[in-house]
Image (tube, rainbow, N blue to C red):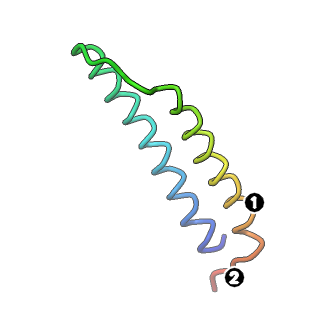
Amino acid sequence: MTLAVLVLALVTLQRLGELALARRNTARLREAGAVEVGAGHYPLVVAVHAAWLAGLWLLAPSIAPSLP
């Protein structure tokens, strides 16, 4: 395993955790009566972040040096 893959795995786990936290916070706010404005762009933001991570997963192993 390369260092790049290890770091990328940690970043991916962090982003998944952040997505779960955002969903939980959204649910809690809606239960308290909040109204979401401009939610139409959120799926695009998630798609762009997923594409960015997918691109890194495709590129990182091929260009990173291996750990000793």
Query: Furthest-front residue in view?
Result: 38
Badge nearest the viewer, 2 or 1: 1
**Quarter in which the N terminus is drawn:** bottom right
Asked if residue 52 is positioned above or below residue 59 in the image, the reply reads: above
Q: Amino acid type of disc 1?
A: Leu
Q: Mark 2 packing: few (<14 Cα in 10 Å), some, or many (20+)?
A: few
Q: Secondary structure at mark 2?
A: loop
Q: Which residue is found at the position 74% from the left and 76% from the top?
A: 63
Q: Secondary structure at mark 1?
A: helix
Q: Amino acid type of disc 2?
A: Pro
Q: CA distance from mark 2 to mark 1?
A: 15 Å
Residue in the foreground of this view, choosing between 29 and 15: 29
Asked if residue 19 is positioned above or below residue 14 in the image, the reply reads: above
Q: Dot 2 corresponds to which residue?
A: 65
Residue 65 lies left or right of residue 25; in this view the side is: right
Counting residues from the N terminus, which is met first, the one under dot 2 or under dot 1? Answer: 1
Q: Which residue is found at the position 50% from the left and 50% from the top?
A: 13
Q: Which residue is found at the position 56% from the left and 39% from the top?
A: 46
Residue 58: numbered disc: 1
Residue 11 lies left or right of residue 44; in this view the side is: left
Q: Position of residue 36 (x, y in %)?
A: 36, 22
Q: Position of residue 35 (x, y in %)?
A: 32, 18
Q: Position of residue 15 (x, y in %)?
A: 48, 48
Find residue 3 and report its image quarter: bottom right
